[in-house]
Amino acid sequence: MSPIRRRSWVTTGSRSATSSHPGIRVAIGTTALVSTMGQPVVQQIVVFAEEVFEVSPFWFGMLGSARGLGALLAAPLVIGEMGRMQRSKTQITGHLGYGIALVLFAAAPVFWMGFIGLGLIGCMHLGSASNLNSTVQLQVDDSIRGRVMAIYLMGVLGVSPFANLAMGAAIAYSAPARWWPLPGWWCSAEVYSCT
């Protein structure tokens, strides 16, 4: 494929993703925010296990399984309710719940509170991500759906390396319990863009 055609492909997908469908802009912004604020905190569970909860490797493994267990427990509810609720209400519930669960995990003084927080993160992430993926795919034509989805997924994958580097630097200079709830509050406050 020539560079001109490649640029045209990216331009068409970008225009479709940002100009004609406001819901797609919100979806891209939401995924970018969660990938920037929420995922780096969750990916640092080893720091919480060792420095905050002071648990053994077994309990660290249990902590690592909490998000998946939460998503599994929420799957029947997400499957059943997705068709009944308005997409905006589903997204508001999922996104606000994600932020609150992130605060619960990040501020947890004891293991089980952190475990429950991570489980709720898994629940809310499943509902929010399923809703956003469906919303984006339903708003675009088949001919450009792949392009738009690629741009949408860059909101998830494109910012993660930089966010994780920033989180690593922050961990090196401060204790986790001090400021780590802030990303959760930020995710919760961003819910107004979904309305």
Image (cartoon, rainbow, N blue to C red):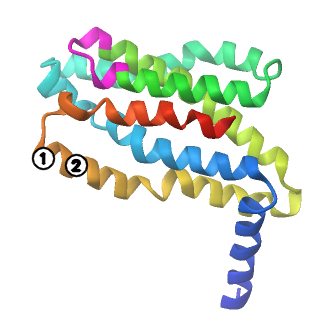
Q: Quadrant of the N terminus?
A: bottom right
Residue 168 shows which numbered tag? 2
Q: Which one is nearer the viewer's eye here, 77 or 90?
A: 90
Q: Residue at x 78, y 47 (%)?
A: 137
Q: Quadrant of the C terminus?
A: top right
Q: In the rendered image of this protein, does residue 115 appear above or below residue 21?
A: above
- Which portion, as a residue range, is magenta? 104-113
Q: Residue at x 31, y 20 (%)?
A: 63
Q: In the rendered image of this protein, does residue 87 appear above or below residue 161?
A: above
Residue 144 visible in the current orientation: yes
Amino acid residing under circle 2: Gly
Q: In the rendered image of this protein, does residue 60 appear above or below residue 21?
A: above
Residue 172 shows which numbered tag? 1
Q: Residue at x 87, y 63 (%)?
A: 143
- Pointers 2 and 1 in contact (CB under 8 A)? yes
- Local SS, label 2: helix
Choose top left, top right, bottom left or bottom right for residue 171.
top left
How far apart marks 2 and 1 lie (CA) works out to: 6 Å
Where is residue 3? Give x, y as percent. Answer: 66, 89
Whether residue 88 sits left or right of residue 124 in the image: it is: right
Amino acid residing under circle 1: Ala
Where is residue 50? Give x, y as percent. Answer: 14, 27
> Is most of the magenta stretch helix, strand or loop?
helix
Q: Does the magenta-highlighted stretch encompass residue 108?
A: yes
